[in-house]
Image (cartoon, rainbow, N blue to C red):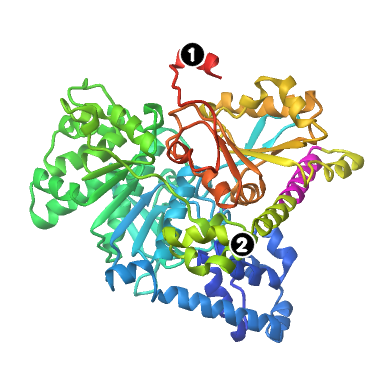
Amino acid sequence: MKPLKTFFVEPNLPDELKILKDLAYNARWSWDSDTRSLFQRIEEDLWESTGGNPVKLLGSVASSRFSMLKADDSFLYHMKQVRQRFEEYLAGDTTWFKRAHGEISGPVAAYFSAEFGISDCLPIFSGGLGILAGDHMKSASDMGIPLVGVGLLYQQGYFHQYLNHDGWQQETNPENDFYTMPISRVKGEDGGAITVEIPFPGRTVHAFVWLVHVGRTPLYLLDTNHPDNDSIDRQITGQLYGGDQETRIRQEIVLGMGGVRMLDQLGLEPPILHMNEGHAAFLALERIRMLMKREGFSFALAQESVMASCIFTTHTPVPAGIDVFPVELVNRYFAQYASEVGLSMEDLLNIGRFPHQDSATGFNMAILAVRLSFGTNAVSQLHGETSRQMWQNLWPNVPLAEVSIGAITNGIHIPSWISNEMGTLIDRYLGPHWREDARDRVNWDRIDQIPSEELWRTHERRRERLVAFARGKVRSQMDRHGASQSALENALEVLDPEALTIGFARRFAPYKRAALLFRDMDRLVQILTDKNRPVQLIMAGKAHPRDHFGKDLIRTIVSQSKKYNLQGKIVFLEDYDMQIARYLVQGVDVWLNTPRRPKEASGTSGMKAVANGALHVSTPDGWWAEVDDEGIGWTIGGGEEYPESQYEYQD
């Protein structure tokens, strides 16, 4: 049934509290604990029930509560302090970029990504790639780098996970309510919503533009749920990584080509376009078309010009993880484009293939991105070696060591992941400068000034909070399964706040080997039930809905825990998200990482744990291969690599 009329309800804030709306619609609160505590003071239970979403909170608070707050001197004083720091932050007078480069008008780069992990209340991400993109935006904001993000706004984000009684993963896909999220629709001078028009075969697809303020950094998101589109095109941005290959190529056309058109329509002219994975590689083709039309360039000349302005970051260590579209599909969606730019379809297809490949070979988005970029980088030094091997054939007769793919190891946005307690302790001994420029090694060298006793007390408080949080999650999970009252009460006794706590949380892809600890159950039982040296394990993570092997790993962990009566020692937290991740990395003693080398391109979850004082235990893969001699953990094995036929022996 179509609605007769749509109403959008906004909170009626008193004038004294108007700043709360500005604070809510800038995602800086996601990494500023003082701003979050201000919203929490409005109504703590409501803050928890809205999932820490300040926009939804403000829309749910009774007007009588606002009347009380505007007369509360303590709250108003707190709000004044938060407002002052917020305005100073936005002014950015002392940022690294301004000190190094002075004032620059307009963005220096546009960062394209299929997903961005800013906050759980903006669910447009699935895992590591999106979390990295979100941290990238936040770090650029802190450092004052004039960056602009480009992505897609999905009606359904990544799935929510729950386990059935047997431990088998189930999925739900709730709809996103854009009007209770920290986003706003971008409007033109006439007050109407800006619409981007993207050419598709035989039609034009229209997309709304939404804006997320990530501190000082704008993130623009395209949304095809537009009334001028047919029902199929309205679903292009329906679900993150949903649908078949045709849905995927449509999404990537909207992201890449639509993203370039959107920047042009908004009057933004970043000299650099950065592709975070190959999903956005069509942006280079659109920029070529625009240059040919505006400047009268030939395709070859426009291609050279575009190559000089594009950068590609590859995250994938295996060919199977890259989008390769069938020739028929590319023909259907790019025949008109090829005609416009004066290329044959075969010439266009060859841009996305290795040299001399068969004409039936599909169109590889990573190859397209490499070919149309002046720089390609992997995401760790080891991944750089893997990537040069993967793509060596793009540089025929060039020695492997000279293949033009570099490596920039991924990092994290420390203020987003460090606990309030640890952050306050570091502030006290290092000052606050580390929050806006974490690269200052001299500043971090002063970490030894913090007394070990203070560090340990801080860590113990976080472990206690993790255990309390995990108990609450376990109780909720058991309640959903109809557990008895006595069982629910027992759930509040699982785990020991003083036991050595090991954390393992990540996507349940087979190469990450989540069940490796469970290969020798007798030994694991002996370790976990040692009364003199208690040890416990907290795990979380999702398997892709179509990855039945990954789902079976989760089922194995749950069933083995029950079989050996280890439910109080092993806990699996359902529906892994940013909140669960923060509790884990801030509270565990040891972070466990067991990928098959060199399958983990970089990995960053362990960095977050280390930043909170946890020790790292990992195979020498990804980022850990570069720092395993730094005295912050232990390495499993000596860097051996095995062929697929010997994986069982390796495990």
For badge 2, the amino acid type reads Asn
Above or below 78: residue 547: above
122 versus 301 height, above or below: below
In the image shown, does 498 or 236 lie closer to the viewer?
498
| Residue wearing tag 1 | 646
Q: Name the dominant secondary structure of the magenta segment.
A: helix
Look at 35% across and 61% down and name the residue there.
Answer: 147
From the viewer's perspective, tell me whether residue 361 is left or right of residue 160.
left
Secondary structure under tag 1 reads helix
Residue found at the very far right of the displayed protein: 486
First of labels 1, 2 by sequence position: 2
Question: From where the camera sits, is residue 5 visible?
Answer: no
Which residue is identified by label 2? 53
The quadrant holding residue 370 is top left
Q: Residue at x 41, y 77 (%)?
A: 91
- Expressed as whole percent of the image width and height from the top left, the position of residue 583 reads 65, 50
Rendering quarter of residue 405:
top left
Q: Residue at x 63, y 69 (%)?
A: 59
Q: Residues within 10 Å of mark 1 (few under 14, many from 20)?
A: few
Residue at point 13%, 57% (across, down): 294
Q: In this rendering, does residue 312 appear at all? A: yes
